[in-house]
Amino acid sequence: MEDITLLKKGQLAEIFNTSVSSIERMMRDYNRLYKGGYESDAKRCCPSPVYFSGGGTVRFSVQDISSFLNHLDDIEVL
C-alpha cells in the first residue's frame, strides 16, 4: 500500500511555497483530466487519487505528489 498523507490545502501551499489558489487550480486540472476520460494522463501526473474532502483536505500519495506538481506548468516546486 502507498503511504497516504492528509493535509489541508493551506498546509500544502505552504510546503510548496505557493498560493492556495494554485493548489486548487492543480486539483481542478487533475480532476478535469480524470473525469474527462483521460485517466492515463491524470494517473501519469499523480497515480493516486487526489480530491478535496470536507474542510478542504487534500489526499495524495507522498511519493507521487512531486511528479504531479512537476507535470503542471502553473507552479514551480522550490
Image (cartoon, rainbow, N blue to C red):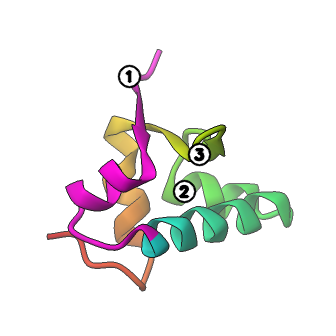
Contact between labelled residues 2 and 3, with CB atoms less than 8 Å apart: no
Foreground tag (1 vs 2):
1
For the point 32% across and 39% down, which residue is it?
A: 63
Q: Does the magenta segment cover residue 4?
A: yes
Q: Give how far across and how far down residue 57 sits, in percent.
A: 52, 41
Up-down relation of residue 60 to residue 34 (above or below)? above
The front one of 35 and 21 is 21
Foreground tag (3 vs 2):
3
**Magenta-highlighted residues:** 1-20
The front one of 55 and 45 is 55
Q: Does the magenta segment cover residue 75?
A: no
The front one of 22 and 71 is 22
For the point 75% across and 68% down, which residue is it?
A: 32
Contact between labelled residues 3 and 1, with CB atoms less than 8 Å apart: no
Figure quadrant of residue 36: bottom right
Up-down relation of residue 61 to residue 15 (above or below)? above
Q: Amino acid at mark 3?
A: Val
Q: Give how far across and how far down residue 75 sits, in percent.
A: 35, 79
Q: Earlier in the sequence, mark 1 or mark 2?
A: 1
Q: Which label belongs to residue 3?
A: 1
Circle 3 residues within 10 Å: few <14, some 14–19, many ≥20: many
Q: Amino acid at mark 2?
A: Arg
Figure quadrant of residue 35: bottom right
Q: Amino acid at mark 1?
A: Asp
Disc 2 designates what residue?
44
Q: Give how far across and how far down residue 15 sits, in percent.
A: 22, 54
For the point 63% across and 71% down, which residue is it?
A: 29
Disc 3 designates what residue?
50
Determine whether, in the image, residue 11 is placed left or right of residue 73: left
Q: Earlier in the sequence, mark 3 or mark 2?
A: 2
